Amino acid sequence: DIQMTQSPSSLSASVGDRVTITCRASQGINNYIAWFQQKPGKAPKSLIYAASSLQSGVPSKFSGSGSGTDFTLTISSLQPEDFATYYCQQYNVYPLTFGGGTKVEIK
Amino acid sequence: EVQLVESGGGLVQPGGSLRLSCAASGFTFSSYWMHWVRQAPGKGLVWVSRINGDGRSTNYADSVKGRFTISRDNAKNTLYLQMNSLRAEDTAVYYCARYWAALDYWGQGTPVTVSS
């Protein structure tokens, strides 16, 4: 199975900060990586697919980049509604696998 | 508007069975692959299973293979997950999700608790 190593596992940031979350795959995934946001008690919400494509309706403050095995999710200017847990996921091969999550908290 | 609504979760004893349903609306259900993903209390997301549009092709996580069966009824726009031989470690919220260039829409989830 492909392991998705996400870092950091948590971070504290202030409103207006630029935040970067990284995800490393244990092997190449052909840029088939997605990013999700999850708030407590809610279903995950899709943000990014194919490493850098924004899902419809997702604000442009979210961006994804990377290739090969190393990928990043960036939030350009953190807002109160962005405090949540973020997950990466590879969908290149089965079983699909998720990173362990990054909890973004208020500093 | 795309909507996915799960149902069928609940409390079941170890070794028991449960069938989850996911009612889909707002899109042409038969054109999309569908997935189940679960999340144990306080833990991360774990992929469970996937089915293609006509129901003829499926994949499973090793942890559920041989115990869970994914299926769909395109006439009823409904996805199913039949769960047998349930174990305590199957306790989780189960989400159905649509696949179109990744898992783009998710249901609200249905909780399953396996306990005596």
Image: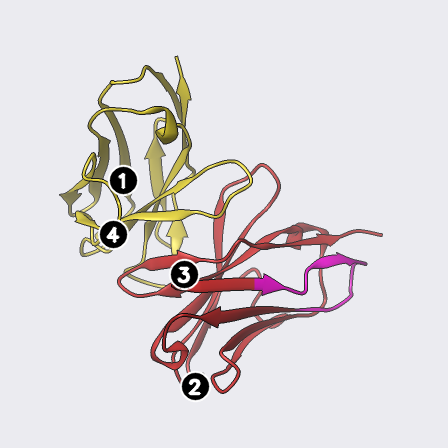
Q: Is B31 a magenta residue?
A: no
Residue type marked 1: Arg
Above or below, B2 relative to A13: below
Residue type marked 4: Gln
Range covered by the magenta-colored residues: B6-19
Residue B44: horizontal and vertical position, in percent?
Answer: 50, 42
Taking the spot 34% from the left edge, 35% from the top edge, the residue there is A6
Task: Give the mark nearest the N terminus, 4 or 3.
Answer: 4
* Residue on which the image places disc 1: A24
* Tag 4 secondary structure: loop
Give a yes or no on whether discs 4 and 1 share a subunit: yes
* Residue on which the image places disc 3: A95
Hue used for the chain lettered A: yellow
Residue type marked 2: Arg
The CA span between labels 3 and 2 is 18 Å
- What numbered label is drawn on residue B56? 2
Q: Nearer the viewer, residue B33 or A71?
A: B33
Residue type marked 3: Pro
Res. A71 image quadrant: top left
The CA span between labels 2 and 4 is 28 Å
Which label sits in the foreground, 1 or 2?
2
Q: Identify the chain drawn in red.
A: B
Q: Chain of mark 3?
A: A
Q: Chain of mark 4?
A: A
The mark tally for this picture is: 4
* Residue on which the image places disc 4: A55
Residue B96: horizontal and vertical position, in percent?
Answer: 49, 62
Res. B105 image quadrant: bottom left
Res. B7 image quadrant: bottom right
Q: Is B7 a magenta residue?
A: yes
